[in-house]
Amino acid sequence: MSLLDPTPLANLLADIGGDRATLAAILAQFLEEAPANLATLRQSSAAGEAAEARRAAHSLKSTAAQMGAMRLSELCRDIEHAAAAGTLPTPQALDALDALWSDTRRELDEERRRYAV
C-alpha cells in the first residue's frame, strides 16, 4: 500500500502549469530539507524545547501534506499538537516517525524520478 496520496501532487502539478521538472525540483527540495527538520525535532525534544519541537513538526506536517505524504503529515500533526500542549514526543515515537519517513522518502524519491523524466 502506498504511503502517498496522488491528489496533492496532481494538484500541485496543475498549479505550476504541468511543469514536471519543477515538480521534480520541489520534491527534491523536500527530500533534502526534511531530514534537518526531523533532526531539529529530535534535538529539541531531547532538550525539552516544546516550542521548537512544535515548529519542526508543523513544518514537516504542512510540507508532507503538500507532497501527498498524508500518514507522515498526520503523525507530525499529532506531535505538533502534543508539543503545543507541552508534551514532547518519546524517543520511541521519534523512532516510529523516522521509520515512516524512511519509507515515505523512498516513495517520494520514486515520484521525483518519475516527474524528472
Image: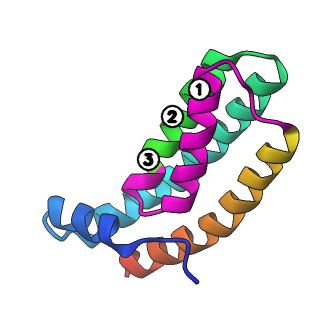
- Total label count? 3
**Image: 79 above or below 66:** above
> Could you say which disc has been placed on residue 63 in the image?
3
Q: Tell me where the magenta segment starts and ends, as one range.
A: 64-90
Foreground: 68 or 18?
68
Look at the image and tell me in which quarter the N terminus lies.
bottom right
Left or right position of 23 against 77: left
Left or right position of 62 against 87: left
Tell me where residue 57 sits by quadrant.
top right
Q: Are marks 2 and 1 in contact (CB under 8 Å)?
A: yes
Main SS class of the magenta portion in the image:
helix
Type of the residue with mark 3: Thr
Spot occupied by residue 22 in the image (x, y as percentages of width and height): 29, 61
- Secondary element at image label 3: helix
- Secondary element at image label 2: helix
**Image: 37 above or below 93:** above
Look at the image and tell me in which quarter the C terminus lies.
bottom left
- Callout 2: 10 Å neighbours few (<14), some, many (20+)? many
89 magenta-colored:
yes
> Could you say which disc has been placed on residue 54 in the image?
1
- Secondary element at image label 1: helix
**Image: 110 above or below 35:** below
Type of the residue with mark 2: His
Q: Residue at x 61, y 20 (%)?
A: 85
Spot occupied by residue 16 in the image (x, y as percentages of width and height): 18, 60
Q: Are marks 3 and 2 in contact (CB under 8 Å)?
A: no
